[in-house]
Amino acid sequence: MRIGFLLVAATVLAAHGPVRAQDIAAGEKSFNKCRACHQVGETAKSVAGPKLNGLFGRKAGSIAEFKYSEANKNSGVTWDEAYFAKYIKDPKAAIPGTKMVFPGIKDDAEIANLTAFLKQFDADGKRK
């Protein structure tokens, strides 16, 4: 019975191919949708939106030089992959009252790629 289960599982996995890893280059391309408002890297500045260096693990509303909405500052969010995925799909639903006008990215693979791209940058904008 156990061998039969393993054979079925192996067949199913083989039929669906390998799990797709995040694609940082595709994430950088996706970041082009964000560039009008956000920057990353060693020379990044907060412009229409806050710089996104060191985003993961950072509390929402904590970049000193950016004027956040009260909703964002008081959200209690600490950015992690799961919350970023929820937020980037529909920012206004994730944090009602946010100033972010971006309509969102709905594709999970694109979000995973964008996440991988952003995770490269530490708080100083250096690539890890």
Image (spheres, rainbow, N blue to C red):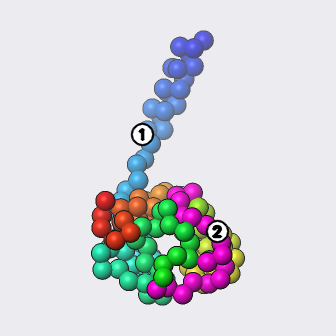
Residue 61 position by quadrant: bottom right
Check the image and report above or below for 74 versus 55.
below
How many circles with numbers are drawn on the protein?
2
Q: Which residues are magenta?
A: 65-82
Give the dominant element type of the magenta stretch: helix, strand or loop.
loop
Quick check: 32 left or right of 62? left
Q: Which residue is mark 2?
A: 76
The spot of residue 74 in percent (x, y) is: 66, 75
Mark 2: amino acid: Gly
Mark 1: amino acid: Pro
Taking the spot 62% from the left edge, 84% from the top edge, the residue there is 69
Q: Secondary structure at mark 2?
A: loop
Taking the spot 57% from the left edge, 19% from the top edge, the residue there is 5
Quick check: 42 left or right of 103? left
The spot of residue 40 in percent (x, y) is: 37, 74
Task: Note whether residue 36 is visible.
Answer: no
| Camera-nearest residue between 115 and 50 | 50
For marks 2 and 1, the one nearer the N-term is 1
